[in-house]
Image (cartoon, rainbow, N blue to C red):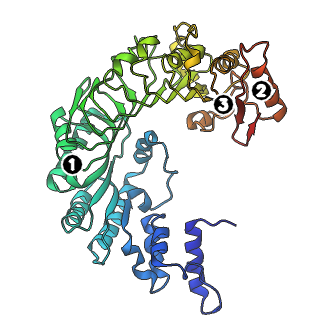
Amino acid sequence: MAYSVPTLLLSSMEQNNVRHRCPQEEDRLGALTDDILLSILGSVDLATAARTSALSTRWRSLPWLLPELNLHVRDFLPVPCPDYPLAAALRIFFYSKIPAQHINQAMASLTRAARSFLRTKHSRTVTKMSLEIYLVGNYSHDIGPLVRDAIDNGTVRELDLTIADDKDFRCKRADMLQKARVVDGFFSTYPNVLPCLTRLHLYNLRFAKGDMLHRTLFDCCKQLQHLSLDHCDAGDGSVWQIDAPSSGLRVLELRYSYLKRLEVLCLPKLELLRWEVWLHNETPLHFGSVPCLKELFLLCGADIDHPGFSLSQLLDGATDIHTLTLNFQGEKLWIQPESRQLRAAFSKLKKLSIQGIYVEFDLLWTINLLEAAPTVEIFGVEAFEHPCSVPFWVRVGVQRVQPSWKTPGFTSCSKWQLRELHVASFSPLVGHHMLFVREVMGRAPKLETVLLKENEEPCRKCEAMGALPTPIGGMFPRGKDEQDAIARQLRDKRIVSSSSAAKIVFKSIASTVVF
């Protein structure tokens, strides 16, 4: 039987309580070395780790010897809260739903824990601290000096900081300006925090001037490697220029931004850029010098009036990308039809994912992108079908806009390096899904695997609707006989232009079957 870390710790605590009755009872954790025990404690939240100090004399000091200190406000909430979302885009809603009274209680508990852990002298140094806080009430004046002193005396050398907010992205502009002043005031009062930051996550900030944003995040944060900004900008329709030749930033993430455009003029170490939801119809990105940029993720649901922009022009200056993900969230495509124009930008592309394609849209248009990227080894498409979005389209009284791309002529298929084709939310009753898979199987000479996947991520809005209608494409095939019949159809030589030796894999929530 497998046990979780908290279960083992609780078991050890229970054994400690009854040891006087069962002296021969073996303490399963007692035989482990301190390094192993510290590794175990490092995998649980700080509140649980602190409680283990009651186990025995040996355990009393162990939590204070942790090399990494995780002070997260969510771990100090007075009552259980909803599951902390793995998807970073959902965390703004998580933080905003916590009642103000619970936030105050959690911050008071977190401050006491920080005082206990940071002011207690031990021989081991906390090299890295992860701090998640709300800047509410006077808590910034309580937690700030503790962090400042820990950095000054060398206890903390690297800081991962999240400043949460009690509002989601629908907050008022005045709230964003006020929040920016509070955050700027915190960093001005404790200036040694900025040079120590390695990771920073901010929510709902509107800086009065773009240069203030640049000064705070790049001129002062010399160790910063990962920056996430949710609903942050310098005003509606503002243009943010990043020119930071000395920056070590490797990951930049933007979500729900009113920026008109982000111009990355110089970020020499940037490896990943992720932008989820922009609110203007123009090209959102411009690249200057980004020699290390390898991965780009763009997600947005465009309205029906969006004119689209040239993907090849957006990628001009970023020609070393090896992983590209485009997600349309079931709406109109926000890229203009292109194929050969993309060859320079796609020259080193290894993985291409086209996600959020409305389930009734044709998929063959995506092969234009594959034609422009013969070096791609993994090509994925994902269909989008969410009943929760239907009421909106009924209310506005319009139809989704079908892709206007022409089907390519497959002139250079012999050069394709494609080895894996992934189709998520596969619907066999939608004819163009089957046609798309057949076309790729028949044209890709090096194809080894076709992975057909069921949608594994439940949508909370869809689940909240109760009884859902039958999907347009029918249910994902889970029965082996049905899967076998589909595999035979995909390999039917009377339909497929050339035979393919690729294995066909059906991956449902319950099982994985290979044909």
418 relative to 336, above or below: below
Sequence order check: which comes first, mark 2 or mark 3? 3
Sequence order check: which comes first, mark 2 or mark 1? 1
To which quarter of the image does residue 10 belong?
bottom right
Considering every residue shown, the one lying at the far front of the view is 414
Element marked by disc 1: loop
> Residue under circle 1?
222
Q: Quadrant of the C terminus?
A: top right
> Residue under circle 3?
448
Q: Residues within 10 Å of mark 2 (few under 14, many from 20)?
A: some
Distance between the alpha carbons at the discs numbered 1 and 3: 45 Å
Nearer to the camera, 8 or 451: 451
Element marked by disc 3: loop
Nearer to the camera, 219 or 108: 219
Residue 510: horizontal and vertical position, in percent?
A: 72, 43
* Res. 10 in view: yes
Considering every residue shown, the one lying at the far right of the view is 481
Residue that appears at 19% across and 46% down: 184
Q: Residues within 10 Å of mark 3 (few under 14, many from 20)?
A: some
| Front label number (1 vs 3) | 3
Residue 487 tag number: 2
Asked if the residue under mark 3 is in contact with the one under mark 2, i.e. CB atoms within 8 Å, the reply is: no
Asked if the residue under mark 3 is in contact with the one under mark 1, i.e. CB atoms within 8 Å, the reply is: no
To which quarter of the image does residue 471 belong?
top right
Residue that appears at 60% across and 76% down: 11
Amino acid type assigned to the residue bearing label 1 in the image: Lys
Q: Quadrant of the N terminus?
A: bottom right
Residue 171: horizontal and vertical position, in percent?
A: 33, 36
